[in-house]
Amino acid sequence: MDLRRGVRIALNVLLCVMVPVLVLGIAAIGKVRSTLDDILRQGEIGSGALQALNDADGFSTGVGILHFVVLAATATLWAVWFRRVRLNAEVFAPGTHRFGVGWAAGAWFTPAVNLWFPKQIANDIYRASVPPGQKPPKGLLNTWWTLWIASFAVHLLGVVMDRIAAVKLMHVGYFADWEEGARLLKSALVVEGLSSLLLLAAAPFALLVVRQLTRLQEQRFLAGPPAPTVPPYGPPQNPFGAGPAAY
C-alpha cells in the first residue's frame, strides 16, 4: 500500500495552475479572432492590421508554450498518481482487474487506446476501492471523463479546420481568396475556444476525482485486510472438465 500524499498534493497544485493557464489561452484565442474580425471589416490587410495580427499571434504562441509545459507536467504526475492508486487497488482486490499495472500509466500516452482503456482501468480501481457489496460512486469520474473526451474530440476538429485554413491562406490566388481563409481560421478559433472551455470545466472534476478516490482508498485501508475476492468477470474455466479451473 502507498498512501503517501506528496504526489497527490503536487497534482492538485498543477490542476489548479491549469485553470488560469486555460483562461489565458481562451483570452489569447479571443484576441486573435478579434483581430481577424477587424481585418475582415476593413476588407484588406494593411501594415497596421498585419502588425496587430502578428502581435496577437505572438501572444497566442507564448500562451500555447506555457499551456504545453503545464499540461505535460500535469499529465506526468497524473500518470504517476493513477498507477499508484492502481497498485493500491490490486491489494484491495487482487486478480480482479482487466488490465495490468503497466497500462495504468501507459494507456494515457498510447494513441487510440487512451480513449477507453483509462476509463476501464478507473472503473476497476473504483470498484476495488469501495467496501464489498457497495456500489462505486462514479458520478464525478463519469462527468470528468465525458468532458475530457469531448474536449479532445473538439480539439481534433479545431486542428483540422486550422490546417485547412492555413492551406487556403498559403495558396491565395490559386483556388481561394484570403477572406475565405480568414473566415475559416475564425471558425477554427471558435472550435479551439470551445475545446479549452470544456477542458476548463473538466479541471475541477479532475480535482474532485483525485480527492474522492484517495479518500476511498484511505477508508478501505483503515477497514482492515480485504476478504478473498472472485474476479467479477467469472473464474477461468477448466478445459478438461465442467467446473472452474483450480487456482
Image (spheres, helix red, strand yellow):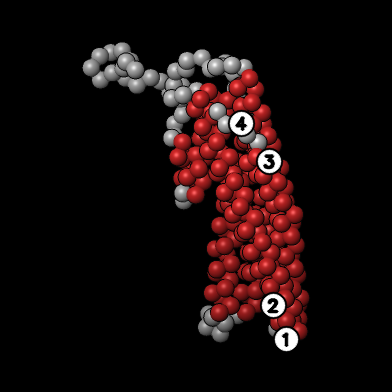
Q: Are marks 3 and 4 in contact (CB under 8 Å)?
A: no
Residue at numbered disc 2? 54
Q: CA distance from mark 2 to mark 4?
A: 49 Å
User: Is residue 102 in view from this perspective?
Assistant: yes
Q: Amino acid at mark 4?
A: Leu
> Does residue 140 sit above or below 245 in this rendering?
below
Density class for disc 4 (Cα within 10 Å; few <14, some 14-19, many ≥20) is: some
Q: CA distance from mark 3 to mark 4?
A: 12 Å
* Left or right, residue 79 beside residue 32: left
Quickly name the residue at label 1.
46
Amino acid type assigned to the residue bearing label 2 in the image: Asn
Label 3 secondary element: helix
Give the camera-side residue of 4 and 156.
4
Residue 176 seen in the figure: no
Q: Residue at x 46, y 24 (%)?
A: 94
Q: Residue furthest bottom?
A: 47
Q: Which residue is mark 4?
A: 3
Q: Secondary structure at mark 2?
A: helix
Earlier along the polypeptide chain: callout 2 or callout 1? 1
Disc count in the image?
Answer: 4
Look at the numbered disc 1 and give the secondary structure of its residue: loop
SS for callout 4: loop
Ranked by sequence position, the earlier of labels 4 and 1 is 4
Per the image, the residue denoted by label 3 is 9
